Image (tube, helix red, strand yellow):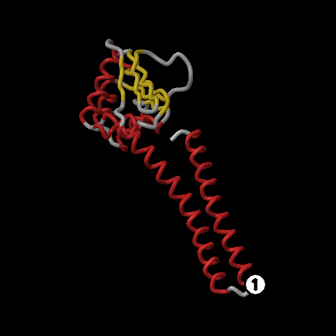
Amino acid sequence: MKWGSAFKLAIRAFLFGVVWFVVGALLVVGGVSLFFTGIRVLAFLAGFVGLFVMFFGLLAAVFKVGSNAFLEKYEASLQPVEVTYENQGFAMVLGQLIDQAITKNPSKGNIVRDLKGNLVVEVTDMNAAATVEFNNGRITVYNGMPAKGKYSLISSDFETINSLATGKAGLLKTLKLIITGKLKIKGIRMARKFQSLLA
């Protein structure tokens, strides 16, 4: 959920809760007034209903936030992840791997559905590099580096990149490769998500 949508949802839920809370508070005040005028049965009834409505208002506000956020996330999960890539060079190979992974297991789209940013995959012994651009459910793969902006990086030889992509390189092996300098990673979170997507 984007910050703008989350903020609007929180404001709506807050106002919704305030309305119920105010109604409940008025009933409680009315109950107190009735108590002092001697109508005690009605006073207790009004007070009880008022307290219930106040509690219900808080509960309803929380439920509204939770249910709407869940619904929005669920609806987003039904939308397929869109993968586009250049039809040449390393970008084509990488793009096809990503496309096949998501086609074979559509639930993997949830791994990168809310991800935004660029990941450069560099194969040092082939002198090739491609950028994987994640944009909230859309993946674009193109040859070369991003023209501007920050990016994460996975850089190594083809054998190591292939091991990472197929899931053959576990956490310990990956750490060993990084320590020995055979593997360079910048932006570990995106790199792990990318590996989970392909593996």
Residue 57 image offset from top left, x and y in percent: 58, 63
**Nearer-the-camera pick, 145 or 20:** 20
Q: Where 191 sits versus 122, above or below?
A: below
Left-right relation of 110 to 43: left
Comparing 162 with 118, the one in front is: 118
Q: Nearer the viewer, residue 68 or 171?
A: 68
Identify which residue is drawn at 41% across, 36% down: 112
Q: Does residue 148 appear to the left or right of 134 in the view shown?
A: right
**Residue at image point 29% right, 37% down:** 106
Residue 27 vertical position relative to residue 3 in the rendered view, above or below: below
Identity, as a three-letter code, of the amino acid under mark 1 = Phe
Look at the numbered disc 1 and give the secondary structure of its residue: helix
Q: Quadrant of residue 58?
A: bottom right
Quarter holding residue 136: top left
Tell me the residue at 30%/33% (across/down): 102
Q: Nearer the viewer, residue 136 or 51?
A: 51
Q: Which residue is mark 1?
A: 36
Q: Quadrant of residue 177?
A: top left
Residue at 40% x, 15% y: name it. Answer: 143
